[in-house]
Every structure is written in structure tokens, then in C-alpha cells.
Image: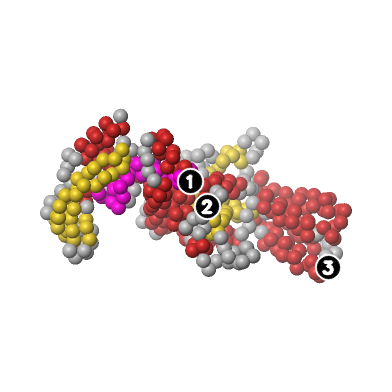
Amino acid sequence: MTRLGSTLLERLLSIEDGRDGQRVACGSGHLAEFVSHRDKGIDTVLGRVRVRRGYYHCRACQRGVVPRDDDLGVPGTSLSPGLRRMVARVAAVAPFAEAADLLADLAGIRLSVKRVERSAEADGQAAAADLERASRAILDSRLAVLPPTPLPDKLYITIDGTGVPVVAAAAADRAGKGDDGRARTREVKLACLFTQTKLDEHGHPVRDPHTSSYVHTFDPVEQFTTLVHAEARRRGGECIRQLVVLGDGAVWIWNLATKILPEATQIVDYYHAREHLHDLAKQLSPVLGADQPAWLAARLADLDQGDIETLVQATTALPINDTDRDQVDTALDYFIKNAHRMRYAVFRDLGMFIGSGVVEAGCKSLVGQRLKLSGMRWNTPGATGILTLRCHRESNRWDDIWRPNNQTRPTTNRKLTAAAA
């Protein structure tokens, strides 16, 4: 049946001989001259087909031009847009070798592992570039966004970062944590935006279903700021009553939030704060002795109420020697600087989330389960491409990559129908 389908598809594509005349625009302001007709093999979801196309040459640019390749969505590639979409789907969820096996087992399409890798990474990188252009257009008011309907009550922006194992060239000139000082990972910054409208029967906030969207980058925080700001606008941040930024306490997160969303409520993840308090109790173990459990329980109660002042006073009142004082002061500084972000009792009364578990889960599922498997080492563009595919899929934006054809110019509906195979 697939062989029959590929035969019919090949005949359909052969209805036009691919010749657009003696001259065509080369794309750089010149005219390219017709040279000859040339065949090209294209792998499709139905099998391999051969297409006859007109080849043109631009003397000014000294390069060839094949308009039919653009029409069919195959410039610089021999995979049809429909097959590229399938390749991207399987490569986004499984390592490239396993993705190639899935294509062979489920669709009868046999591609080499390297072709699967190159195609998926290229389409992911193209989607990342499109998202960056759209983000800048939104912030420059060249692209208008409409508020969501119905309008949710709160929009959360949760932010975190995690390391991705990379090849040596991708980590050059970066300090590492190993004994040799070499870096073996690159940090990818990830943001998850979601909305909340309701509380459950116990008064706990409930995330609105199917509202999570993700943006990410390996680039410096300035680029990440652009992506997050644009995504917040796209999600209706300028119209929603309450904005909330949740993070683990890293300074760069709060600098980002203050720069682009100064009106948002900033909240340090409650569970990170508890971890810091447990670490502080361990540092104070020689001073507290047998009273350590009771002291920790009292300070956890202070934290739960958002009473950071009492927590700090109870700690500084302890008889800490000069040797340990600096370490304790450093630990307390985390609570002092983030006191206004730790008013957890107030936040709970207002029906807000106080944990950043959504984005932490994203770091594990989106990044860890695909990019951090045993033996993996990525270059930055490749990791960016695959992670973009995964984020678009989880953000319900998968179809945005394929409208009408990724990396192709608009064409007629008939040509699109044929190319989709």
C-alpha cells in the first residue's frame, strides 16, 4: 500500500515539470538563468519518490537556484516536511538510534541514525530561531498579542536552571566543579509559565489544566530575559490581575524578575528555604547539641509563618564562636535578603503557590530524561534543537513549527498537500 501511495505521489508531483521560465529571481536581487532539468530523490512518509525540477544558475551570486525545492519544502534536504515532522516527533522523545528504530518498526521508514539526528536538530534549531524572532517582535510591539479568554486570575512564572553534559568544545573557557577545574556541563535556563484560577476544597491553589508553556536557552541571562518577558506578554501578563515569580533564590532570577516584571509578587520556593534551614541547623550542631531538634522545629515553624525576623534573631542570639560566625552569617544572609519573598503565611492566605515544583519537574522530564542519559555529550546547537522540540510539544505549540512548511516560503494548497507526504 505504501509503494502504491508513493507511486501515486510521484505521479502527482510530476504533473508540473518544475520549470518556472527562462529566468527566476535568485533571492539576492538578481535573475538566475535556466540551465536544465534535474531529478531529486525525496524520502516521504510513503517511501522514496523522484521529482523532476528546473535548475537555474545566478552568475552574479555564483550559485544554483531550484525554486521547486522551496515550493515542496525540501531546500537543502531530501526529507519531505511530513517525514521531517515524524522524525522530529520520535527524536524528541527518544535517543536518535532508538528513534530510527521506531520509524522503521512503526512506519516502515528506514533512515540512518545520522539523518534522524541532523533532521531533528535542524528543525528544532529553526523553531528556536523563529521563537526568538517572534519574542523580539512582541517586545518591539511589531506583533500584537490578544489577552486569553476567559482571563485567568493569576499567571505564574517559575524559573530554574540545570546542567546538560556537553562536548569539550562547548564547555571551553568555563570553570568546572571537578578536581581538574574543567567544566563538563552547560547550564540551560528553563522557565515554565502557567495560570491559576481556582482553589480546591481545602483552599489549596490548583493549576489550570493544559496551561503550561516553556521557554529555555543556553545563552546568557539577557537572552533568557527577552524570551521570558515575551512569553509573559503572549500569555496575557499585562491583563492578568496577579503575576507571581517563583524561584529557588538565585540572584539572577530576581534580577530578571525585577527588570521585566517589577509589579509581580516574588516568592522563594518554600522547599528550598527549608533545605537551607536544615543546612543551617547542621552548621549549628556543635552549639545546639541535644537541643538541635527542638531548635530546628521552632525555626521551621517561624519559616512556615514567614517570620524571618524571629528566625534570624533566634540564630544570632546563640553563642557562636568567631570561627563559625562567618559561615552562619552567610547562611543567614540568604534569609535576610529574601525575607520579603518568604512571607509564606500571607502567600497561602492569598491562595498562591509557594513551591516551584512545576519548573523543577520540567528540568527533570524535559531536560533530564532526554539530554542527560548515560553517555550523552551534546554540542550546544544540537541540545538547543532537541530541547526546543520538547518544549514546543509540552507547550501545545507543536503545530507552530509546521505552518505551513518549516523553513519554506508560502505556496499553494495543492503543493502543500503533496509536500506534506
Task: Say which of 222 and 372 sits in front.
Answer: 372
Which region of the structure is painted magenta?
69-97
Mark 3 and mark 1 lie on one chain; the one further toward the N terminus is 1
SS state under label 1: loop
The colour scheme is secondary structure
Q: Position of residue 362 (x, y in %)?
A: 55, 47
Using a 10 Å C-alpha cutoff, classify the residue at mark 1 as few (fewer than 14 neighbours), some (14 to 19) or many (20 or more): some
* Quadrant where the N terminus is found in the figure: top left
Q: Residue furthest left?
A: 22
Q: Is residue 146 visible?
A: no
| 320 vs 16: above or below | below
Q: Is residue 288 visible?
A: yes
Query: Can you identify the residue that label 2 sits on?
Result: 376
The residue lying at 17 percent from left, 63 percent from top is: 59
Query: Can you identify the residue that label 3 sits on?
Result: 321
| 162 vs 12: above or below | below
Given contact means CB atoms under 8 Å apart, are the residues at marks 1 and 2 in contact?
yes
Give the CA separation, mark 2 to mark 3.
47 Å
